[in-house]
Amino acid sequence: MRYKLTIEYDGTNYLGWQSQENGKTVQEAIEQAIFKFSGEKVNLCCAGRTDAGVHACGQVAHFDLPSDKFDAYTVRNALNFYLKKEDVVVLNAEVVGEDFHARFTAKKRYYKFVILNRHMQPVLEKNRVWWVGPHLDEQKMNDAAKLLLGKHDFSTFRAAECQAKSPVKTLDEAYFVREGEHIYFYTSATSFLHHQVRNMVGALKLVGEGKWSIADFKKAFDACDRTKGGPNASPSGLYFMRVEY
């Protein structure tokens, strides 16, 4: 029996999604919860691995159990019972066919990045936004972000440890919306490179601050060189929003 999970988590206290030997991860927390209610050790596969400190509103994962004795309602409630001490909750569980794969059958992934743009540092939103003190011009950031749309070589915004076979990706959305002190960046694509969203936002921040012109941004993008791409935005502002299948 294959189960599809839709998961929400605060990534602040985790070393990212993927299981590691040196610290707590989201994958490990859920796999341990599965073992506690089913007695089975499983390999949980997700739609998109997130880094340390990155959050999720609609991460999707799947796993298999050797029998059909647990319905989806029971799986969701059992997992949430054993996850009570974690910053993780299963929003939904579904029984799916064996042809479903959280990663490989995904058609599009959606991310949101949240910037708190004010002089004072955050308290209530600490670890949930990227705090930027200097005023940002979101219109200039939007004008630069339009250059990212379509099919390009995104090497400038690719982490050195990225394992993707190709740096070429097709970006469907990339735009900013300001709401008071908050600036939201929305982006979607079939898939992303490691650190791509955070690196894009880091470079676009330079445009918003006036440190880069749009021409400077284009030059860095066209260089296909990570060393030309500006800072890496804080993981605390990044949210994996949802997956389209």
Image (tube, helix red, strand yellow):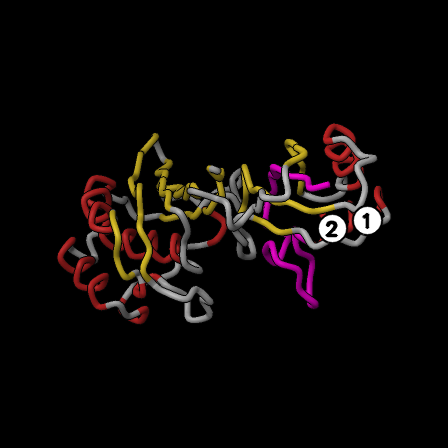
Disc 1: CA contacts within 10 A as few (<14), some (14-19) or many (>=20): some
Viewed as shown, does residue 152 lie left or right of 87?
left
Please tell me how many numbered marks the rendered image carries.
Answer: 2
In this rendering, would 60 be left or right of 139? right
Q: Residue at horizontal 80%, vertical 34%?
A: 70
Q: What label does residue 31 carry, if any?
A: 2
The one of 81 and 170 positioned closer to us in this rendering: 170
Residue 79, placed above or below residue 45: above
Where 170 falls versus 96 (above or below)? below
- Location of mark 1 (residue): 35
Q: Residue at x 63, y 38 (%)?
A: 97
Q: Is residue 121 left or right of residue 38?
A: left
Residue 37, compared with residue 104, is above or below; it is above
Residue in the image at 48% along x and 38% along y: 245
Find the magenta span and give its range. 1-27
- Tag 2: amino acid: Glu
The answer to whether marks 1 and 2 mark residues whose Cβ atoms lie closer than 8 Å is yes
Q: Is residue 86 above or below residue 76?
A: below
